[in-house]
Image (cartoon, grey):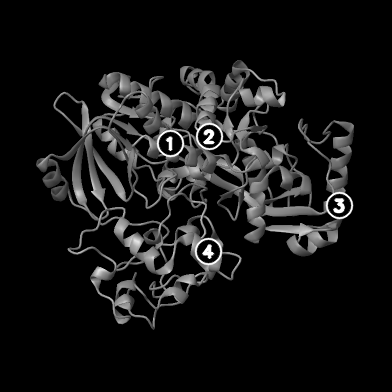
Amino acid sequence: MLKLKLLPLAMSVFFISASSYGETLADFHKVQGNNCQSCHTKPIKVDDAESHENKSCEGCHGTLAELTKKSKKNLSPHHSHLIDLSCTSCHSGHNQPVLVCQACHDTFKTESKIPFSNDSPVLDNYEFQSITQDMIEKALALGPTEQHELIIIGAGAAGHASAVSARQNGVKDVIILEKQSYIGGNGMLAAGGMSAAQSLTQATNGYNDSKESWYQDTMKGGRNINNPELVKTLTENGSAGVDWLQAMGADLSSAASAGGHSAERLHRPAGGAKSGPEIIRTLKDTAKKLGVETRINSKVIQLVQDKQGRITGVLVQGKHSKLHVLGAKAVIIASGGFARNNELVAKYRPDLKGVDATNNPGNVGDALTFATKVGAATVDIKEIQAFPTAAAGKMVISETARGAGAILLNNQGKRFCNEMDTRDKVSACVWSQENKEAWLVFDETVLDRLGQLRGMLTLGLIFKGETASDIAKLSGIDAESFEQSINRYNDFKNKGVDSDFGRKNMADDFQYPIYVVKVKPAIHHTMGGLKINTKAQVLNEKDQPIDGLYAAGEVTGGVHGGNRLAGNAIADTIVFGRIAGEQVASSIK
């Protein structure tokens, strides 16, 4: 095992400038008496996942979990809720480092320095090198370097659901390509739950629901511009998707309500933990057991077609393997939406220009370029949703918090809307307030029901007060107005009627201590995308399937119409991911 003097530096939670350590991390290692083979194989060959290099890092410094345990700070950048985050996800031996935490957590951006960044702004996502058309044509001319049965683009919930489904239905050779240095996509950030009706979880908890009710709620929430056939497919298969995940070991034993839903149908783990990480971990572990290979740092540039128009593979840009073609009998696109591409968002919604997004940094709409080049049609592309309660402008506070009893107050301490309305309506209400912001207010009961909120206490985003005066000192909200609003809401709760805004679900009355967190709407979901049918086949402008091409999840359009209901995104990824895998298996057979 190598012995380096870097360990104390690696344990530091708040990174320091590298001015005294050389220009790069590699320089520093050399100063300590190491050479290239200290980190790399001999001869040097680096795979896109940088597997050997990460093992070398851990050999000297320990795992991320070990570094976090040894940290003396409350917040350690070595602790992450992201799956398969590795040393090289942030640290680079020869290039500018990346700090993935700051993509969502501004605390890390303003207070942390990462070694060898030379105090310059640190990226929050790896930037692939620019390529030319000449380079693309040369790679295409060489033909496939490998041949596979199925290639899936994107390692989020839809991608993993597709992979597991395909393997379970007999597809022997499945590859997932992920352009980021870690997997999970938006699914990893999903907070509320997975929508489903007539599930075993609902029956066990005594919640009455029906698939028809869910269908009607989804159509109404989407302002009835949804594709009815896709919505019917979603609502008829949601409960089977929950059963499927639970059979693999996922905890979806709890169900909650949310705006736009007429029943408790957002399935999540017991205790109110986030549903996304639970689902992604379950799918990832199952995919691994089934022999699915996932390649990170692998960006799809182009789809490859034969002379008949059938999709026969993909052109990939690997972080180290560079441009190469992978052949396949079928391709499933599961690369997510484009909420993090504000330029593209503003093209369709000028009013959202400059608005933060809650999404994973990779959700920039790559597929809208490479899929449309092979004739894929798009639908509802202008339908873009804002999430009403994002802390720090980008961190989702699940609307199940409101379902559990939280309310919204403005800076004057007054309620201003029905907190259980649909996302578009609540967002519009918040935007109409002073500074286009509001305060989400809840007590210990809600905190106990939604354990995910406790992490925001550690981040310093949530304020706790024993009295209205405490709340006023911490937040600037008028103490008298705050107290009046709480008492008025408690009175409505006890009488069973919200005389101000008609809220139906008021959960419990408020008791001190009370917590408040500043929120504002953020771009959250792009309802439009590639046009598909109920078999998850991608359609061209004539509504004909493009042979060999399928899609699932937020990269598609038509399911959610003009406004997505909470929990329907995860349901979309699971239901149509499973269908895509099944259809590929059927076509290959």
Between 227 and 280, which is closer to the camera in this rendering? 280
Q: Quadrant of residue 420?
A: top right
Alpha-carbon span between mark 3 and mark 1? 50 Å
Dot 2 amino acid type? Gly
Name the residue that disc number 1 marks: 286
Alpha-carbon span between mark 3 and mark 2? 45 Å
- Tell me, yes or no, if residue 304 can be seen here: yes
Query: Given contact means CB atoms under 8 Å apart, are the residues at marks 4 and 3 in contact?
Result: no
- Please report whichever mark, 2 or 4, sits nearer to the chain's N-terminal start: 4
Whole-percent x and y of residue 481?
84, 53
- Which numbered disc, 3 or 2, marks the residue closer to the eye? 2
Quick check: 588 left or right of 250? left
Alpha-carbon span between mark 4 and mark 1? 27 Å
10 Å crowding of disc 4: few (<14), some (14-19), many (20+): many
On residue 353, which mark appears? Answer: none
Name the residue that disc number 2 marks: 249
SS class of the residue under badge 2? loop
- Please report whichever mark, 3 or 2, sits nearer to the chain's N-terminal start: 2
- Which numbered disc, 3 or 1, marks the residue closer to the eye? 1
SS class of the residue under badge 3? helix
Q: Quadrant of residue 117?
A: bottom left
Q: Quadrant of the N terminus?
A: bottom left
SS class of the residue under badge 1? helix
- Please report whichever mark, 4 or 3, sits nearer to the chain's N-terminal start: 4
On residue 68, which mark appears? Answer: 4
